[in-house]
Amino acid sequence: MDAEMELPARDSQLVQIMKASLADATRRAGEWLVCRPGCTQCCYGAFAINQLDVMRLQAGMNVLRSTEPGRAGGIERRAQRWIDEHGRDFPGDPATGLLGSSDADRERFEEFANDAACPALDPATGLCDVYQARPMACRIFGPPVAMDAGDDDGPALAHCELCFVGVSAAEVAACEMRVPQELEQGLLDDLEHEGLRGETVVAFALMGSCGGSEDG
């Protein structure tokens, strides 16, 4: 995606901060961070994305449709095949692409499409065809990032299992990638006030779905 991607104005600051944060974490991690183009382990399995991610992916697809229609068409075909294969078991509304929010839906999602390749992944090159527009989960995967541990111990650092092998906890902590979670949440709150809420998966976003409200 060589052309400049037009991002929603409110998202531009977040993306720039994340680029700088990744570059800084990568510098500190050095050879401990083994993420490289063509390493695709993180490109398998469905994961939830938010409405900011949806806007970013759709902006990226709009660029591709005008500059590289062949690549855009390939992505759309892969996304449609993904939906055709997994849509029947989708734990939400396949008409809108929005994930369900009930406890039962969340439990179903834990086992949903865990082995499926992301439709943005080019199987021939092992590269992401929408890399500049990728979701936040993709932007933070690899370096150590603070995650809610779900207990009283507070956030824990998580990183790709292929990275930081044999490295001490202190050395991992020294390479933490900072994520502006408050900024992202503020932007999501603004979108919710505009009626854009709910989560989806990459395939539906690539096809232009899931821009609406959970409430319809």
Image: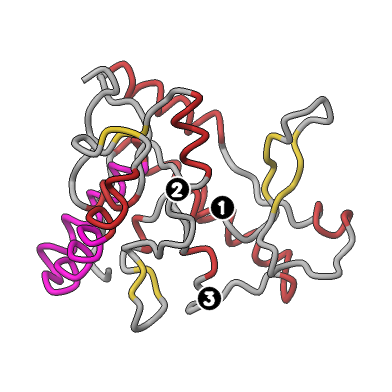
Picture layout, residue 25 above or below residue 98: below
Picture layout, residue 111 above or below residue 175: above
Which of the 4 image quarters holds residue 161? bottom right
The residue identified by callout 2 is: 112
Pick the quarter of the image with the N terminus.
bottom left
Residue positioned most to the bottom:
124
Q: Is residue 214 left or right of residue 100?
A: left
> Percent from the top left, x then y, of residue 62?
16, 55
- Residue 28: say if magenta: no
**Identity of the residue drawn at 72% across and 72% down:** 30
Picture layout, residue 107 above or below residue 125: above
- Depth check, front residue: 192 or 11: 192
The residue identified by callout 1 is: 140
Task: Say which amino acid is labelled 2.
Answer: Phe
**Identity of the residue drawn at 18% across and 61% down:** 76
Q: Nearer the viewer, mark 2 or mark 1?
A: 2
Q: CA distance from mark 2 to mark 1?
A: 22 Å
Which of the 4 image quarters holds residue 24? bottom right
Q: CA distance from mark 2 to mark 3?
A: 22 Å
Circle on res. 39: 3
- Depth check, front residue: 145 or 41: 41
Which of the 4 image quarters holds residue 101? top left
Q: Is residue 76 left or right of residue 167?
A: left
